[in-house]
Image (cartoon, rainbow, N blue to C red):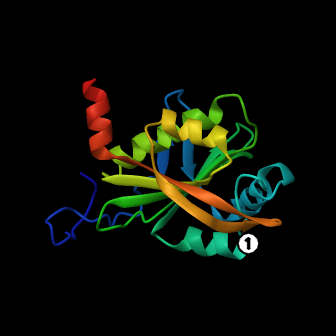
Amino acid sequence: MRPSARRHRTGRPVATASNVLDRVVTHAGRVLEAARAGEIDEIVALESRPDMQAYVASWSRERHLRNLADPNWRYLVLRRPAGTIEGFAILSDILSAHRWLNLERIIMEHHGSGLGSDVVRGVVDAVFAQAEAHRLQLDVYEDNTRARRTYEAAGFVEEGVLRDAVWRGDRYVSLVVMSVLSSDRVAAQRR
């Protein structure tokens, strides 16, 4: 059980530890660790690349710094041996009394190598093992089929569509809401 002195009205523990999800080890042995404020410029640069605009909305440096300082958010970075960032994942609602976390984004520098899939699976495993989540959810642009396939392979189920939810460039785009529940994972392990 994660460290906690507080309990939700249901009797379930509520996350209070600042070290929940500070380190994630993927299936392939890659390690994601808590980001530092000095790495925000690299994070902004990765998500602001022209080839990423079709997949994720960019946030300002200030917004990232605010989120990073908030104990309810967790920024995890995958560093190369030289220390530069190869990719990152952002989670929110870490301290949710409902044990419902949001995967805000996962961005890898390079696509098609399987690195992103490995990171997604590692983050999903850690969310349920370390944070004892009941639910992990995300939303993804409807036309981002590669990411949707990656999320489905990691156990996410499509729940619905938020039609014309985001203005992207010159048009509205829809978001697909996806989630994975702790009970989904238990059922999958029994198969």
Relative to 140, say whether 58 is above or below: below
Image quadrant occupied by the C terminus: top left
Relative to 24, say whether 61 is above or below: below
Residue at image point 57% right, 71% down: 67
Q: Which of 42 and 98 is in front in this view?
A: 98
Relative to 190, say whether 129 is above or below: below
Query: Secondary structure under badge 1?
Result: loop
Q: Where is residue 69 in the image (x, y as percent from the top left)?
A: 55, 72
Residue at image point 64% right, 65% down: 164
- Which residue lies most toward the right here? 50
Question: What number of labels is visible?
Answer: 1
Q: Name the residue under label 1.
A: 60
Relative to 190, say whether 13 is above or below: below
- Which residue lies most toward the top here? 191
Q: Nearer the viewer, residue 1 or 172?
A: 172
Q: What residue type is labelled 1?
A: Ser
Residue at image point 71% right, 62% down: 57
Question: Is residue 25 visible to us here?
Answer: no
Q: Position of residue 174 (x, y in %)?
A: 63, 59
Residue at image point 58% right, 36% down: 149
- Which residue lies most toward the left here? 11
Q: Position of residue 133 (x, y in %)?
A: 33, 53
Q: Residues within 10 Å of mark 1 (few under 14, many from 20)?
A: few
- Quadrant position of residue 185: top left
Q: Where is residue 62 in the image (x, y as percent from the top left)?
A: 70, 76
Question: Is residue 32 visible to us here?
Answer: yes
- Quadrant position of residue 47: bottom right
